[in-house]
Amino acid sequence: MQDKIERLREEIDAFKADSKDQVESFRIKYLGSKGALKGLFSDFKSVPNELRREFGQKLNELQNRAKTRLEELRDSVEDQGSETQEAPDLTRPAKPTPLGSRHPVSIVRNEIVSIFSGIGFSVEEGPEIEDDWHNFTALNFPPEHPARDMQDTFFIEKGDNDIALRTHTSSVQVRALERAQPPVRIVMPGRVFRNEDISARSHCIFHQIEGLYIDRGVSFADMKQTLLHFVREFFTEKAEIRLRPSYFPFTEPSAEVDVYWGLETETDYRITKGTGWLEIMGCGMVDPNVLENCNIDSKEYSGFAFGMGVERIAMLRYGIPDIRLLFENDQRFLEQFKTAY
């Protein structure tokens, strides 16, 4: 497998393209759904556990190199086209086409995912309609457990295995752990649903980003340092956090993460309730029961998980007073984010 990685790296670096079709051929050959890198990741399942970390890093480096090379080839082809570009068509309308804008939730989601991708987390997604096992039971919510009352659920079908709209993206954790053995380092963005009254601060539909890291020797300190890195990348490099004890069925110990927001303005006092601290996410060490439910030896592996609401973070960043504005598609509101790319 080492030889395959080295050979592919040489091929990628040596690839030349003179047209957009050749650039697309590069993408399909190396990064497509049936490309060379996809095959290597499939072969990765057969790598012995003691070598997985080494080969996993090399595979990620190779994938990043292929993506970088793809952008280089695209830029090169565009530069060639600009040099041979014909004179502009003076008969075209002079009025430019109005630019659209990205939704603030999309902007914040992409930035959060980018920060965690930069430290080795890959993106996982899962279905929005889930069964009871993945949404509750495997996450340490046994039948009749009072913790199930923490989340009001939209059930689609009641029976031996209830079907419902997922109440959190934690269900993706279960699917990922069922499919791959540790080490696992993933973030899981997605839309979730809870049967709640719609108000200025809550909605029945919202977005979450959860993270999961499972490996040998993962500690609470690893989790705190990871989240501190995220906060300083997203907010400010001088940001500080604190962890308060909390409870989640799928983590033990569990904590709420607060970031120091400050008390410089009247708004700061209002949103922090006079404390200067603002809650932004929950986190904790993955409960051994969750690992065992996914056929992972909890005596050999440990890990942490965290989760945050994207709408909440977006409202903090842009000073949005009402969550309903994020769902009403009011053009006057969305146009404010034209430059927020």
Image: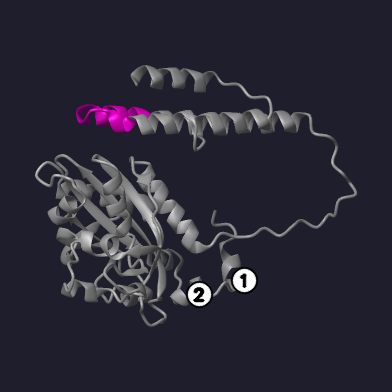
Q: Where is residue 41 in the image (x, y as percent from the top left)?
A: 38, 33
Residue 191 figure quarter:
bottom left
- Compared with 301, 288 (above or below) is below
Q: Which region shows up in magenta?
A: 44-59
Residue 330 horizontal side relative to residue 178, left or right: right
Residue linked to disc 1 = 331
Label 2 crowd (10 A; few <14 / some 14-19 / many >=20)? some
Along the horizontal axis of the image, is 147 left or right of 280? left
Q: Can residue 172 be seen in this view?
A: yes
Tag 1–tag 2 contact (CB < 8 Å) = no
On the image, numbered disc 2 is attached to which residue? 325
- Looking at the rendered structure, the kind of residue marked 1 is Gln
Q: Nearer the viewer, residue 186 or 265?
A: 186
**Residue 98 on image: x %, y %:** 71, 60
Residue at the right extreme of this rendering? 91
Foreground pick, 42 / 265:
42
